[in-house]
Image (cartoon, rainbow, N blue to C red):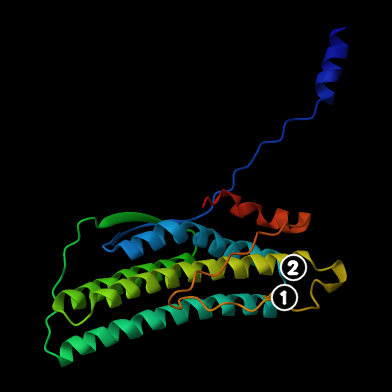
Amino acid sequence: MADKTEVKKAEIPAAKRKIEFSNPYIQKTISLNTTPAQLAFDTAFDECAVSMRNLSAVLPTIIKNQSDMMAVNGAVDHLINKALAELRKVAAQIKKIADDNGIEMGRLSYTNAATVEAKLTCHKAGQYLQIITELDELICLVHSAWFAGFIADDVKSSMERKWRRKAIGVAAEIKSITNRAFKAHNNKGPDQEHDDDLTLTDGASTTETGTEGSEPAATATKPKRTKKAAAAAQPAEAVVA
């Protein structure tokens, strides 16, 4: 009887240990003075960081065609670089107007400045965080110019709204590009996996973000992944938005 019990125990397979993937990240503390920058961080940063992580660590494991990855990364880099260039151009214009008119723009104090913790899951997440910090710096300049009297009340409000929407819209576009890249890969048959280029558009034209009065571009619904894509994406599951 004892022998039969030992045989049954031997037949029971050993339980597999569940492995939790350990993904690297950097915790960065930044100060945000202005409400537009704080709203952009609270609304968009975490989801954008997840998209950036998927773009940097997951997508390259399932897309072997180098030109496809270059197309996706190029689209995202264009969005980030364009947003930073526009923020810096407007900031330089405000500084020049102040210098030309001999206006001293002092450092302002803020009633509800916030210190936030940003979890950077990859290098690209830090690039989007840079957009938020430069948005904060730009709005501080707008407020200084408003206090100095050469920016009107309605212009101040308009600029706050415009550049907040611009920053949030960039995050929405990045998420949409990443999701479309996964969808394009999942829709391919086995024979097409390395032959066709990824299509970053779904037939609809991309709406330019940051235009005054416009809303941020709508984000694409994350497509269902194939078993192959799901297996490759598993290491990024630990990243929480």
Q: Position of residue 36 (x, y in %)?
A: 34, 65
Quarter of the image with the N terminus is top right
> Is the residue 148 above or below the residue 4 in the image?
below
Percent coordinates x, y for residue 58 in the rendering: 63, 62
Q: Nearer the viewer, residue 61 or 197?
A: 197
Circle 2 sits on which residue?
185
Q: Secondary structure at mark 2?
A: helix
Does 61 appear above or below 147?
A: above
Q: Residue at x 38, y 73 (%)?
A: 163
Q: Percent x, y for residue 189?
A: 85, 67
Residue contact at pointers 2 and 1, CB within 8 angstroms: yes
The single residue placed furthest to the front in the displayed view is 154
Identify the residue position indicated by label 1 in the image: 198
**Residue furthest top as drawn:** 1
Q: Amino acid at mark 1?
A: Leu
| Residue 156 visible at all | yes
Question: Would residue 130 be visible to someone looking at this image?
Answer: no
Q: Residue at x 61, y 70 (%)?
A: 177
Q: Quadrant of residue 228?
A: bottom right
Q: Nearer the viewer, residue 104 or 193?
A: 104
Which type of secondary structure does the marked residue at label 1 adopt? loop
Where is residue 66, by image quadrant?
bottom right
The x and y percentages for residue 29 are: 32, 57
- Write the residue at 12% across / 84% down: 103
| Disc 2 residue type (three-letter) | His
> Local crowd at mark 2 within 10 Å, few (<14), some, or many (≥20)?
many
| Residue at x 70%, y 73% (from the top left corner) | 202
In the image, taking residue 233 as reference, residue 47 lies left or right, namely left
Q: Left or right of 226: which side holds 40? A: left
Q: From the viewer's perspective, is 61 left or right of 74?
A: right
Residue 82 is labelled as none
Q: Residue furthest bottom?
A: 100
